[in-house]
Image (cartoon, rainbow, N blue to C red):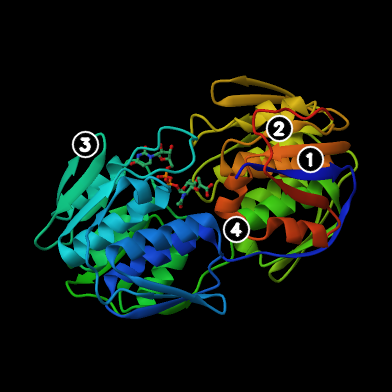
């Protein structure tokens, strides 16, 4: 059903927001259940549609999955298929995470090519090259990916690009290989650290978590099922911290592992936001005259590309000219269309956006075209004077759990309307 989020903006937000479990770490932890035989319990994983779709992929393979009291119980005792068809794999990027575990455990996998947000080319050669170096034979066509292996063997890998899901796939495969694998130039995102901590609980031996050199001591046998609580979602936390810097009076975000937010907090302070850190809770108050600043996205610990669209909203309200260089994806400025409709002054030239700040945004009828772009439009609409309609709510549902209720609790006038004709523009 088509629908929209309606926001009456221009009011400050105040109070407390609790961050849900991490979508991206949760997706990898779900794939890791294939490395074990038995019933794993994943606590805290948010019931967002990407997680539902990953569950459907696993169910198709034969896993039995139940959600009880907020926990996901995944039983991988009897897998009956090693093939994920297009109608399931095509729904999310993270279906690629099943490749390494299936090949390592069962010696075969066939996946239709993964879907996900259209934010750039999103190649997968790091996954393929790494699995080949571990001993798999991989066939990549325009439609699917097929891999065979009798037994994977430890090896030394050097990633040309520190791919997040690529690193996750190769760690999981290496856990079941015979011998030691080194992954050099590994991605260092906190979601990878969370996966490693869980794999260690499952019996894997891994050194170097959080660094770009990982050493995985493979023992050639399945791991044990786990009971594990996923880390908090740092992109959801970051989205709310940026909201606080725009409209907070004051906003406390609980569930921020602050060591993972250094790049964001540094930039928020550069803009002039007042930030108070107390354990895993961060309180943000808006600055009345935000300063402009320049941002370049990059792999962790750089500024996260997944927070770049939300940060563009803040910089649209700065007193001067800011520049954003999007260095991770080649097509991640789609939010600028909606932000311009709200009055923002943004010029884009290739990977660089130049933002000339204006005093305030105005409500508009806008559409998001991917998860984080749509989240940025929600943030903009909260700051904008007047009413905004935001189409593309299905993107929000992919990755933000209970966003409307959380925002209502801090004073945002937000509702969802269903059954709107997506082609009909609403005059505001
Ligand atoms: N890349 C290559 N070759 C590869 C793989 C990637 O050149 O073989 C390049 C990509 O073209 C891109 C960069 O490396 O320029 C980053 O891609 P990466 O593979 O690291 O991204 P991903 O693993 O597909 C994950 C998150 C994304 C997040 C990125 C970057 C999941 C399921 N997805 O994607 O999350 O943007 O890492 O941090 O973990 C989101 O949550 O909204 C989202 C898009």
Q: Earlier in the sequence, mark 2 or mark 3?
A: 3
Q: Earlier in the sequence, mark 2 or mark 4?
A: 4
Residue bearing mark 4:
234
Camera-near label (2 vs 4) is 2
Label 1 close to label 3 by CB (< 8 Å) = no
Q: Is residue 50 above or below residue 118?
A: below
Label number found at residue 141: 3
Label number found at residue 366: 2
Kindly indicate the quadrant of the structure image that contains residue 271. Answer: top right
Callout 4 environment at 10 Å: few (<14), some (14 to 19), or many (20+)? many
Query: Which residue lies at the image location 89% right of the left edge and 37% below the top edge?
Result: 385
Q: Earlier in the sequence, mark 1 or mark 3?
A: 3
Q: Residue 155 in the image: state x and y as whole percent.
A: 18, 57
Query: Which residue lies at the image location 38% right of the left edge and 45% below the top edge?
Result: 90
Q: Quadrant of the N terminus?
A: top right
Q: Residue 200 in the image: state x and y as whole percent.
A: 36, 75
């Amino acid at each position: 059903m088509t629908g929209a989020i309606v926001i009456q903006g221009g009011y400050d937000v105040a109070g407390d927001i609790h961050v849900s479990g991490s979508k991206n770490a949760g997706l990898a932890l779900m794939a890791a259940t294939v490395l074990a035989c038995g019933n794993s319990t994943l606590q805290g994983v948010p019931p967002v549609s990407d997680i539902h779709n990953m569950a459907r992929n696993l169910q198709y393979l034969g896993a039995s999955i139940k959600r009880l009291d907020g926990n996901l119980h995944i039983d991988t005792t009897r897998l009956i298929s090693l093939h994920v068809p297009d109608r399931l794999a095509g729904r999310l990027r993270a279906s690629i995470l099943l490749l390494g575990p299936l090949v390592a455990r069962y010696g075969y996998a066939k996946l239709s090519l993964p879907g996900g947000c259209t934010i750039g080319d999103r190649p997968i050669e790091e996954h393929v090259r790494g699995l080949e170096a571990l001993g798999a034979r991989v066939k990549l066509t325009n439609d699917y990916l097929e891999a065979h292996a009798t037994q994977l063997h430890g090896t030394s890998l050097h990633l040309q690009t520190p791919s997040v899901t690529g690193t996750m796939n190769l760690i999981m495969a290496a856990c079941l290989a015979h011998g030691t694998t080194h992954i050099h130039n590994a991605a260092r995102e906190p979601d990878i650290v969370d996966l490693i901590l869980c794999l260690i609980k499952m019996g894997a031996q891994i050194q170097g978590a959080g660094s770009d050199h990982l050493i995985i001591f493979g023992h050639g046998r399945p791991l044990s099922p786990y009971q594990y609580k996923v880390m908090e979602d740092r992109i959801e936390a970051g989205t709310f911290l940026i909201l606080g810097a725009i409209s907070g009076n004051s906003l406390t975000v609980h569930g921020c592992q602050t060591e993972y937010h250094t790049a964001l907090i540094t930039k928020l302070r550069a803009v002039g936001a007042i930030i108070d850190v107390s354990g895993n809770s961060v309180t943000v108050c808006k600055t009345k005259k935000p300063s402009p600043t320049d941002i370049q996205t990059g792999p962790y610990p750089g500024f996260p590309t997944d927070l770049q669209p939300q940060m563009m909203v803040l910089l649209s309200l700065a007193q001067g000219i800011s520049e954003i260089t999007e260095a991770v994806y080649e097509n991640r400025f789609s939010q600028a269309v909606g932000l311009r409709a709200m009055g923002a002054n943004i010029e884009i030239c290739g990977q660089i956006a130049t933002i000339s700040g204006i005093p305030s945004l105005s409500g508009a009828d806008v559409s998001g075209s991917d998860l984080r772009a749509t989240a940025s439009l929600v943030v903009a609409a909260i700051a904008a004077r007047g009413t905004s309609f935001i189409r593309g709510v299905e993107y929000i549902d992919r990755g933000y759990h209970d966003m409307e209720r959380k925002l209502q609790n801090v004073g945002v006038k937000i509702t969802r309307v269903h059954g709107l004709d997506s082609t009909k523009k609403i005059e505001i």
